[in-house]
Image (spheres, grey):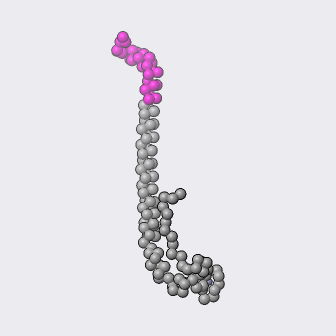
Amino acid sequence: MTASPNTPADQARALLADLEGQRRREEQAFRAGFEAGYRDGWEIGYAHAHHEMAAEWEALAAKVRAMTEVATVNAREALDESAARGEPCAAACGRCSRCARAAAVARRGGDYLGERAHRGAA
Ligand SMILES: [Zn+2]
């Protein structure tokens, strides 16, 4: 049984006797504080990253939506009739996009209308 410190000398002796306990309590308090700070910092960083990714996904989704609104069938129908038939440019240069398309139409024997997508097949 330890006597409760009454005098300053008793208090000093009690403090000295508990130096190791004090060091252990300070270490535990430091560790708890460090872990709480680390956890809070991680959560704040995660929240920032989440907001950044959400903003980037929103921009990407808007871009994809804009792309899907392009009516490819309508765009094809709106093509110049001669380009649709696969006729080269007036100069028949063989290098421009119209001539490349004309070569593709000639190679395929007609306009390419696309293929049905096969999903799930590896
Ligand atoms: Zn050309």
Image location of residue 105, percent across then percent down: 58, 79
Q: Is residue 27 magenta?
A: yes
Instruction: Residue at 45%, 52% (x, y): give it.
Output: 49
Instruction: Residue at 44%, 17% (x, y): give it.
Output: 17
Q: Is residue 15 rendered to the left or right of residue 104?
A: left
Compare residues 19 and 84 and report the one nearer the observer. 84
Image position of 73 with respect to 121: above or below: below
Quarter of the figure with residue 4:
top left
Q: Is residue 14 rendered to the left or right of residue 98?
A: left
Q: Is residue 8 rendered to the left or right of residue 104?
A: left
Compare residues 66 and 33 and report the one nearer the observer. 66
Instruction: Residue at 45%, 73% (x, y): give it.
Output: 70
- Find the magenta span and give its range: 1-28
Counting every numbered tag in the picture gives 0
Question: Where is the N terminus found, in terms of image quarters?
Answer: top left
Instruction: Residue at 44%, 48% (x, y): give it.
Output: 46
Quarter of the figure with residue 5:
top left
Image location of residue 82, percent across then percent down: 54, 86
Q: Is residue 29 magenta?
A: no
